[in-house]
Image: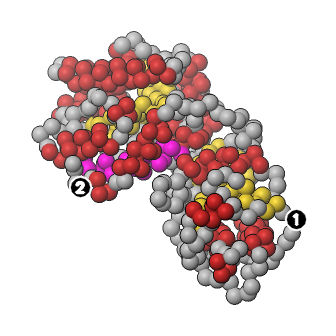
Amino acid sequence: MTDPIYPWLDPIEVRRLAEGLMRPHREPTMTVEDAGFDQGFVGYATERPALPMVAQPPFPPQQNQQVVQPPASARVMSQPEQPATPEPTRARGPFLDRITRFRDWMHSQFSATGIFILDREGAVIFDESNHGRLHFLARSLALASRRQGAAGGNVHVKIGAGATLEVIPVDTAYGCLVLGAVVPDALPPASVAAVMDALALVSSPPNGNS
Amino acid sequence: MISIAVSSQKGGVGKTTVSINLAHAFARAGVRTLLVDADPQGSVGLSLTRQSRLLTGFYDYLADPGIPLERLIVPTRLETFSLVASGQASDYEAGGAGMGAHLARVRAFLRSVAARGFDLCLIDTAAGLFGVTGDVIASSDAIMIPQQAEPLGIRSVPKLLEGLNRLRVMNPRLSVLGVCLTMVQHDLAESTEAAAALRQLLPPEMVFQTQIPRDGLFVRASARGLPIGVLEDGAGAQAVFDALRSEIEMKLEPNGARG
């Protein structure tokens, strides 16, 4: 078969994507309003950024958020890897502290009004409330933008006047986590790269433990 | 009414040629057809109307909510065939490259086309699956994808499929009619091999049986501002687009997409 073409493609992945497209459409499982949109809904998807981190990693901790440790199944799906960003110099603390620091950093750096984190099965790792209706949408978008064996790209969806849901799949020591962040405007590629690095960092278990 | 976006990841694959001649094939079959030029380069308009740059068109409609559809429609000598030119506003004047910005307006446009009594709205989009093109796809009932039968074009297929999967999240009702091989050169091994590779790569139902050959007739038709079927010796080429039309009709009817 045509050697100049196939080395450029993953035929199995191409077939999987194509077959998904050829299936008859499913009726929407929720209305626009159910999905958390208002009538100002518009949608958008972008490519994965390739720019370096520009913001500093998060620090100060806070309390009172729903936090669930990644399930054991998620931990064994992917072997821990060295994070792409450098270790912070101070002690990082337990997972709750690290994730809340990350939340605060998202608030301060990007004016995020809410974030949630899902694992690759769609289970909620962290949700600071009021965004439950966006979980399904975020996971669907993340799956749709993800290629087998490769990291997915970020996707953003305008969910109302002055509110955009930024969906960022991040490969971490616990496998792929999906970050959903409600921000005023879509994040530029450099910011998305910074967020990916920061979440990978705070999700990496210190000394192999969380 | 059904709306079909004619789109591709890559430029120069024959979208405009397919759009013009396919729209003409539908119109000849009695389908009230509106061909919309949603490419800022205005290739449909440049091909079929000499004064296209003076016409108010699709991008003007997006930019100005005060413009009614009636001002855009250009009739042709074939009663069932009308055009909407690209217009004088560019995509940048209409709001820049961000996708989603014109979704509501594109949908309003399609509602107006349906209310005007058209059976089919065929939309020739700019290359890529973002910006206004993304909004058109996210608003359309169906999409068909011309794909040049050459190795470089085939390599863009994964990107195309990823983009379509994302857009389908936004528009779950989008029916993917399939990929149509264009500019097929039977006397060129690389072209026939690329066509064969694509057919092996994709599910059979995703690739149209009809292929569009590379043919000097298309250049002549474009030079004269006519669909190829109107040329004296264009009957053979017209038969190709009639076959493509039949395939599309068969694909649409089982899905009940045609309303």
Q: Is residue A88 above or below residue B163?
A: below
Residue for badge 2: A4
Residue B152 is inside the magenta segment: yes
Residue A177 visible at all: no
Residue B147 visible at all: yes
Q: Nearer the viewer, residue A30 or B227?
A: A30
Callout 2 and callout 1 share a chain: yes
Q: Quadrant of residue B146?
A: top left
* Magenta residues, start to end: B150-166
Q: Position of residue A42 (x, y in %)?
A: 65, 43
Q: Nearer the viewer, residue B37 or B250?
A: B250
Kind of residue at badge 1: Asn
Q: Is residue B55 left or right of residue A54?
A: left
Q: Is residue A52 above or below residue A32?
A: below
Q: Position of residue B207 (x, y in %)?
A: 34, 34
Residue at x 47%, y 48% (from the top left corner)? B162
Q: Position of residue A95 (x, y in %)?
A: 75, 72
Q: Quadrant of residue B30?
A: top left
| Colour scheme employed for the rendering of this structure | secondary structure
Cα gap from disc 2 to disc 1, whole angstroms:
57 Å
Q: Is residue B81 above or below residue A156?
A: above
Residue at x 78%, y 58% (from the top left corner)? A127
Residue at x 29%, y 39% (from the top left corner)? B199
Direction bottom: furthest residue: A89
Residue mark closest to the camera, 2 vs 1 = 1
Q: Secondary structure at mark 1?
A: loop
Q: Nearer the viewer, residue B55 or B242?
A: B242
Q: Position of residue B37 (x, y in %)?
A: 44, 34
Tag of residue B123: none
Direction right: furthest residue: A64
Q: Is residue A176 above or below residue B122?
A: below
Tag of residue A64: 1
